[in-house]
Image (spheres, helix red, strand yellow):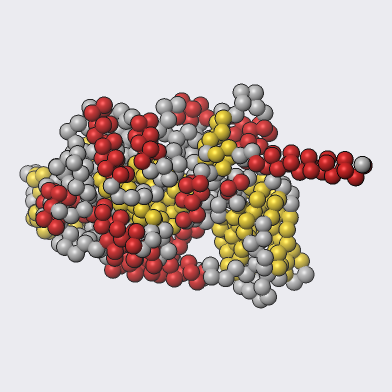
Amino acid sequence: MKKNISIFILLLALFVEAQAQKQYYEKHVVFPANATTEEKLDMASRLVPTPQQLEWQQMELTAFLHFGVNTFTGREWGDGTEDPKIFNPTELDCEQWVRTLKDAGFKMAIITAKHHDGFCLWPTKTTQHSVAASPWQNGKGDVVRELRDACLKHDMKFGVYLSPWDRNAPCYGDSPTYNLFFIEQLTELLTNYGDVHEVWFDGANGEGPNGKKQIYDWEAILATIRRLQPKAVTAIMGDDVRWVGNEKGIGRETEWSATALTPGIYPRSGEQNKALGIFGKAKDLGGHSIVARAAELFWYPSEVDVSIRPGWFYHTEQDNQVKSLQHLVDIYFKSVGYNSVLLLNIPPDRRGLIHENDAQRLKELSAYLKKSFAQNHVRKGRAAWQAASGAMRQYNVQKGALVNTFMIQEDISKGQRIESFLVEAYKNGAWHYLCEGTTVGYKRLVRFSDSRPERIRVTIRSARGMANISAVGLFYATPLANKNEEIQLSDVPLDKWCATEDSSCLAFDGNRNTVWRSPSLTTLVVDMKQKVEVNGFSYTPPTENDLTGTIYKYTFHVSLDGKTWEKCDADGEFSNIMHNPTPYFVRFGKTYTARYFKLEPLSEINGEACTAIAEIGILTNK
Ligand code: FUL
């Protein structure tokens, strides 16, 4: 009898334990009004991804394909006035895109079905501004379909970027009408092309205070996606995938997928995020103090989007500016290795192909990653480990193995729980510090200098409840030399140049790290001291930290005598410069003979009255 009671109690205890373990919150959790910080952290530890968010995270490498009228105009943001006839790729081959990506280890391709210019890469019924009005395949072509078919054939997941901001649609800004128009476009994309795995809406709207103001009906837009493609994740202006906060390819070392950041599309987001003092670019989105003050949490993991080139669209002059292998590897460690998914943009060229230079770099990247992660030198690194704060586990290491990279993964289907960890190596009879880190999540990679440990021990310094560690690893990633991606910003030597007001001007000292600043919107006038054939210029904004003064709209003028000026035929806008502060190369429609030039800022990125120029250069070569 006594024995039976003990068995019963044991079973009951196991049952209660199992129930407690099982109580997970999928994607969203609301804290009871009187919850203590401990209770909140416990609930936070049981917040888990939806099945599609989990599948998305496991992809690690995804690709963006920016393609459209900008590919043919050389712009980054089209203004919607482009003639659809300019869209005419000569050798478009979506299979080449997908094969290139697949061989490089990418699991999904996301196409800009419509960028801000409003030009649609599929023959939509909603507007004339589409491939149907282009000479490509006599107006019978459909880029979205071709990519879709190639993805199906090569077993690649497929996603669409549909820009909410539309500079072509006449109804943009007439909110109810445009919402219907946008939902109709979305409906076409989500019904006619099979499974869509990610829908990407970006938040850009550069029209500013005097432009058209559109109030989006996010609820109806999201409901459309849930109805038509329930398995798709919605990104950025969505609530499944969060923008990391920059376009440089750099994630956060401390990255909580379980975050207090309310997705921007929820009407309550402004108020809630402000009350918590957090925003998309904030450093900490889910630490103790934030959870303590939050009323709800979201499983809202980070996606790192960055282009393999300086621009998002293909520009011939950037053929030699494809990011170096070293740079891409660094991006990999700071995205995938920082609990994020990497969304790397590889823009097809005017032929409609991934350019040889980009394809070559992708090959190098995949060879490097394959080689680096081919062999886990930790023995039994895949054995599951449940660890509370303070728990420690020793691992044997393959004899004599040289390592410089530590990997640790949590089984996030049971939540993200680790707050910090320490790794030590046993060598020559003693334990030595090897590396440490904060959050883990799906995957955390930490690099350290070369070592040959006999054993390692991993300590979970702090966890929210019981962490579920699914893998621990040690690898060797060959260090790569820092390859200079320095680019030529001016075809005309700068040494004789003179600014009319300031002869030692930092705007043309050949150093991108020094910035010429003015406390007003100031026109920079330069005497090049020689006559040159000018067909463009480059503008480099301050690229680090303080972007204040970055020019958004401008005019550019040239002169032979410094008195009579001619306005050059230029875009007048450094599109997307706020999020992508890299050198901008502007080519004019014609060549001007000039000795003087002036750059007149019309507006600053945040509407401030100040100017900053890190470098300015003159382009002469076609
Ligand atoms: C930004 C856009 O403005 C860029 O052109 C690009 O599409 C990038 C991925 O998102 O917000």
Q: Is the N terminus in the top left, top right, bottom left or bottom right quadrant?
A: top right
Say whether residue 426 is left or right of residue 32. Answer: right
Say whether residue 430 is left or right of residue 615. Answer: right
Up-down: is 448 above or below 178? below
Q: Is the C terminus in the top left, top right, bottom left or bottom right quadrant?
A: bottom left
Q: Report whether residue 486 is seen.
A: no
The residue at the point 66 percent across, 76 percent down is 400
Q: Residue furthest left?
A: 564
Query: Which of the 4 image quadrants contains residue 8?
Result: top right
Relative depth, front residue between 493 and 85: 85
Q: Report whether residue 47 is seen.
A: yes
The residue at the point 38 percent across, 30 percent down is 219
Q: Residue furthest top?
A: 33
The residue at the point 32 percent across, 46 percent down is 161
Relative depth, front residue between 616 and 80: 80
Q: Position of residue 230 (x, y in %)?
A: 41, 42
Q: Position of residue 274 (x, y in %)?
A: 47, 28
Query: Which of the 4 image quadrants contains residue 323?
Result: bottom left
Relative depth, front residue between 592 and 495: 592
The residue at the point 54 percent across, 46 percent down is 255
Q: Residue furthest front?
A: 1
Relative depth, front residue between 252 and 94: 94
Looking at the image, how many numbered discs can be counted on the residues?
0
Q: Position of residue 596 (x, y in %)?
A: 14, 50
Up-down: is 263 above or below 586? above
Up-down: is 182 above or below 145? above
Q: Position of residue 579 (x, y in %)?
A: 35, 44
Up-down: is 361 above or below 591? below
